[in-house]
Image (spheres, rainbow, N blue to C red):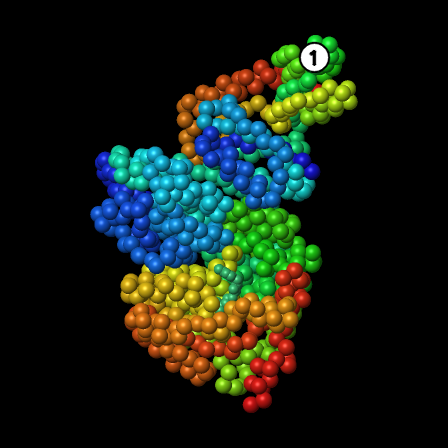
Amino acid sequence: MAAAKKHDHDRNPPAHTTRLTGSEILWATLEGEGVTTVFGYPGGAILPAYDALRKFPIRHVLVRHEQGAAHMADGYARASGKVGVCVATSGPGATNLVTGIATAMLDSVPMVCITGQVSSKVLGTDAFQEVDITGITLPITKHNFVATRPEDVAPMIREAFLVARSGRPGPVLVDITKDAQQASAEFDFAAAAPKPHRPHPMLKTESASILQAAELIRNAKKPVILAGHGIIQSNAGAQVITLAERMRIPVASTLLGLGAFPASHPLSLGMMGMHGEAWVNHAIQSSDLLIACGMRFDDRVTGTLATYAPNAKKIHIEVDPAEINKNVKVDVALIGDLKEALEALLPHLAPRDAKQESAWLREIEAGKGEVAVRDIRNLPDSGHLYAAHVMHDLWRATEGKAIVVTDVGQHQMWEAQYYKHDEPRTLITSGGLGTMGFALPAAIGAKIACPDKEVWVVAGDGGFQMTAAELATAAQEHLDLNIAIVNNGYLGMVRQWQEFFYDKNYESTPLLSPDFVKLADAHGIRGTAVSSRSQVLPAVTEARAHKGPYLINFMVEKEDSVYPMIPAGSALHEMIRRPKKSPLVETAQDK
Amino acid sequence: MLHTFVALVEDKPGVLTRVASLFRRLNINIVSLTVGHSERVGVSRMTIVCEASPTAGHRIAASLYKLENVLQVDDVGQLSHVARELALIKVAANPKTRSQVFELAEVFRARIVDLAPESLMIEITGVESKIEGLIQVLNENGDRILEIARTGRMVMRRGQHTSKVLEAMRVPGVETPEELKAEEESAAASDVLMAEETGFRE
Ligand SMILES: Cc1ncc(C[n+]2csc(CCOP(=O)(O)OP(=O)(O)O)c2C)c(N)n1
Ligand SMILES: [Mg+2]
């Protein structure tokens, strides 16, 4: 909640204390909170608000499905660090937001969702398009509100922004009845400011714990930093780099932590967990000290807890006290803003003796060799196109500088493995909820937040079809967006599980797709299909040069799998490796 | 094991749902939950008793704090406290069998609060085991229990007399309003008075 204070706006809010309708108060308050863009879809119960919109300097992006609006607000927030805003009508409009809200909740993304509601006079009567959206979203929002009077609107919206971005961020929903939008009240932006938040009383970075943490770090022979999403949200990248460099500690990253620590940094190990490289997980398993920074020991990064990092002491630096000792019992907990905690910790650490560190780093380095040989990127061009080639070439062409927004599945893991992110907020992906259909709308939000940045969608053929309607939104908004579909003809990640754990019973995973290039064309969007490795770079170059949206349909190997893989419930070091006798690899080597 | 939490919450619609929903989400069964006014208008006090693993206390308290309407949480399980529950028990009894029930009530320091031709109502206050003791004896005696209403456990920590509500409402870095200051002072004054009576231990 310390973070909240920093974000508090000192810009001059609209200075009027005038009588406005609830609708006008809504937009004026959003304007005062610094909102320039909202993503939404109109309907009866939110129509008064839409009617007033044109009087305010706020861009409204018309989506094609409210789930898209929530994901766009989410992508906007993740790319910019600001609070994303989406708007929907009551009933079906509101319920369509639900998946998007849960996605933001699980990944701690600050978002304010505004829904219209039936008039307060008929609340609770099953009126047309009435649904109890605050009840429905109770467990997937940080907090939610119902405004039934125009004078509720400004204080609730302002508090929603405070809650959304304070502490561990998350989505907040404000449900506004139609009569509250229509009636009038005095509006005073400053007077509607929320009371400062009482910090979570369990936050504590006591000096004793800091000293204890410093002591553990000084004495560790095999330390590893676990870099999570919290680094990006707390803006603590520089402090983590200082810690790693000063103490010569290698850094393993969660999926959402990618980019928080530069992938090209010599101390970067890469992604840990279920699809992390073998040496990363081995390093964690043989470590004697884990320094967890803004991460929550999700089951996808720990494997079975019984055998997780058995010899390691654990320091957990985390803003949410409820995460401490939830999955992994820790030795020292620094509960608070990560950046502040690291700033308090660093003065107690003198640079580490170079001899001590190198044995550990050499041990880790030694684990890499054999994997590099088996890397399919190193195989001669067999005419087969692997998703790994696509990701690798995309990374090279964009020099690792693009914002990549991925969907969920195999392509998501390949992106995480082969696209090296050096900057925070350059990988946007649904980690906690794993929401298929996230990529295209979230990328639209990211592009609108960062119009000068190159933005790429990386989606599977399955997930892309879940929200493909948002192609029309990209076209209508003239967005310079690049779309890479990794088309393997399968719900690939599920097929992989069927291959490994269900005797290759490919039930309901082969997938017929439309011709994506024609689909793009129907939207007035340029596109091309690629089926060989040599065509990848030229197509990517063309897409980058093209102004406006561009779609590439990459026809990749159908039955390739993501390696290594830790089966759910196995230990972190029990990985399934790419078999030497894989038919795909063999044909490539034969040539 | 049983955990007992005291939570001070804003007295607003939906707050009870938020608290109850949290326990449901954590897959923890609430054994009892009592809510009522606290020493300050606008703040309710809840005592929540739940069954959860011995290590779950921290996470439950931390998660309660994450609810925006929760001002203060106290995990009182390990601390010295007074626990009370109130029960109303309606027992079938006619003029012939009444006196026997009267005697039992006497032993348990319970009171008879209603008398009807075919039944009577007992009011009993105490720790859960005392109430359960009375129920057991009534059953063993063959008195037919017609209805039981129990409030669930209410607890208060011993010896800490400052207003928890005032403490919870204070935001660091913000001036304490005059009105709050005055209340705090009078609360502190009454501490002195009450401290003299704290010799009492059950
Ligand atoms: C909304 C939703 N439904 C189902 C799933 C389960 N699921 C996870 S990955 C996956 C397959 C994704 O297929 P595709 O989009 O083609 O990507 P690929 O794995 O082939 O790269 C499925 C069905 C999910 N994550 N989200
Ligand atoms: Mg696929």
Q: Residue farthest to the bottom?
A: A591
Question: Which residue is at a point 66% across and 22% down the rendered structure image?
Answer: B146
Tell me if A530 is positioned left or right of A293 in this view.
left
Taking depth in this image into account, of A451 and A20 the one nearest to the observer is: A20
- Say which element carries label 1: loop
Please say if A348 is above or below B77: below
Question: Which residue is at a point 53% across and 25% down the rendered structure image?
Answer: B36
Number of other residues with Cα within 10 Å of mark 1, as a class: few under 14, some 14 to 19, many 20 or more:
some
Please, which chain is the residue tagged with disc 1 on? B
Question: Which residue is at a point 70% across and 15% down the rendered structure image?
Answer: B93
Amino acid residing under circle 1? Asn
Question: Which residue is at a point 29% across and 40% down the rendered structure image?
Answer: A181
Q: Which residue is mark 1?
A: B94
Q: Position of residue B56 (x, y in %)?
A: 64, 42
Taking depth in this image into account, of A464 and A510 the one nearest to the observer is: A510
Task: Examine the rendering and report whether any part of residue B183 can be seen.
Answer: yes
Number of numbered tags placed on the structure image: 1
Q: Position of residue A112 (x, y in %)?
A: 39, 48
Instruction: Report which quarter residue A154 is drawn in.
Output: top left
Task: Examine the rendering and report whether any part of residue A148 can be seen.
Answer: no
Tell me if A576 is positioned left or right of A464 in this view.
right
Q: Position of residue B43 (x, y in %)?
A: 48, 28
Q: Position of residue B68 (x, y in %)?
A: 47, 39
